[in-house]
Image: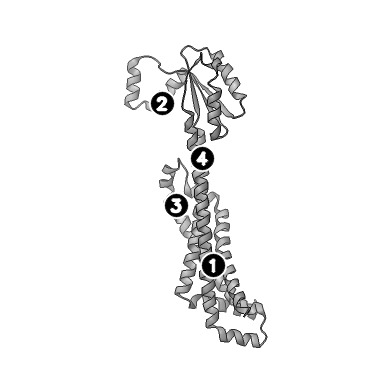
């Protein structure tokens, strides 16, 4: 490493240390912006996971009248499978429904009530999943055809599918707000870093003028302030990485209950390189861009 590079690095490190409270303020603002971006990335992962889980659980259940022939149900199944909006059709016999109920309620009062009536009260049914939550309405309309009414007892409320649609809309709104906040905080981070570097430049004004007079190259003058901004961004990114990892580990069980099994720490580990790129990329970008802007603004004078 040449002496010039060593001097640039040492001067940048000295500037980073000397600013004290200003360096801390710069680091903190960049940290908040980076941490918010990481949180938005995590939130998007949780919502996609929750969306998939809800789509697996929400369906249209069609219950058939007692003693409906299996052949008649198969005909309806075949017609449904030909409907473009239908993703999956699954048949449950009355015995299947009975066994599932026993398995789910064998230790509670509902099982005792079932045992008391000494008969199978359940009806054969088919469960239909749509390719898209907005398509449940059209599937429900299809099932209202007159030709099906002689065998269908009832169809459950398809409007449950709107839960996913509302969740999707909410996600879009939160993502928009999150991106706006990240943009706002990034702007503040750039301004704070810009002014911190600018104050450093003014405090070394005489030294810079001497370097100019003796013909020092532009990159040699800019170097220490670039390193100072780089160190602010690097420190903020490292802090965000450590704290975000700790938060993912500590909150994994609580969030798992809220988001139907979504494990924050597993998501963190599975996407760690993308998070590293996001955190360190955004932190270093904010630190270096603002420092370069400050130097350029001064050297133009």
Mark 2 element type: helix
Looking at marks 3 and 4 on the same chain, the residue that comes earlier in the sequence is marked by 4
Picture coordinates of residue 80 (x, y %)? 58, 23
Q: Secondary structure at mark 3?
A: helix
The mark tally for this picture is 4
Asked if residue 92 is positioned above or below residue 231 in the image, the reply reads above
State which tag comes first along the sequence, 1 or 2. 2
**Labelled disc at residue 190:** 1
Position of residue 47 measured from the top left corner of the image (x, y, whole percent): 50, 44
Gap in Å between the C-alphas at discs 3 and 2?
34 Å
* Placement of 231 over or under 83, stated as above or below: below
Left or right of residue 257, residue 71 in this image: right
Single out the mark in the foreground, 4 or 1: 1
Q: Residue at x 57, y 20 (%)?
A: 77
Q: How is the image coloured?
A: one colour
Q: Residue 221, relative to residue 64: is it above or below?
A: below
- Label annotation for residue 249: 3
Distance between the Cα atoms at labels 1 and 2?
59 Å
Q: Which mark is residue 156?
A: none
Q: Which residue is mark 4?
A: 51
Residue pointed to by mark 2: 103
Q: Are marks 2 and 4 in contact (CB under 8 Å)?
A: no
């Amino acid at each position: 490493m040449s002496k010039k590079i060593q001097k640039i690095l040492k001067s940048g490190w000295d500037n980073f240390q000397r600013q004290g409270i200003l360096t801390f303020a710069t680091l903190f603002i960049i940290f908040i912006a980076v941490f918010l971006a990481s949180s938005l990335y995590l939130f998007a992962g949780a919502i996609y996971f929750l969306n998939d889980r809800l789509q697996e659980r929400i369906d249209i259940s069609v219950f058939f009248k007692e003693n409906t022939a299996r052949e008649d149900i198969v005909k309806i199944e075949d017609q449904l499978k030909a409907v473009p909006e239908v993703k999956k059709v699954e048949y449950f016999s009355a015995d299947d429904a009975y066994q599932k109920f026993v398995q789910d309620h064998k230790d509670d009062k509902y099982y005792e009530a079932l045992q008391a009536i000494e008969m199978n009260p359940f009806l054969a049914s088919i469960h239909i999943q749509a390719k898209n939550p907005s398509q449940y309405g059209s599937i429900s309309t299809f099932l209202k055809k007159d030709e099906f009414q002689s065998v269908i007892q009832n169809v459950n409320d398809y409007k449950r599918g709107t839960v996913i649609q509302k969740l999707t809309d909410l996600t879009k709104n939160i993502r928009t707000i999150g991106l706006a906040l990240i943009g706002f905080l990034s702007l503040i981070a750039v301004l704070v870093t810009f002014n911190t570097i600018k104050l450093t430049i003014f405090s070394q004004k005489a030294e810079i003028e001497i370097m100019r007079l003796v013909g020092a190259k532009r990159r040699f003058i800019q170097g220490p302030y670039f390193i100072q901004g780089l160190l602010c961004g690097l420190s903020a990114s490292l802090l965000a990485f450590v704290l975000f990892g700790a938060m993912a580990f500590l909150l994994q069980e609580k969030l798992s209950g809220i988001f139907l099994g979504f494990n924050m720490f597993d998501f963190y580990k599975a996407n760690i390189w993308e998070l590293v790129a996001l955190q360190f990329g955004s932190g270093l970008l904010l630190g270096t861009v603002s420092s370069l802007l400050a130097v350029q603004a001064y050297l133009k004078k």
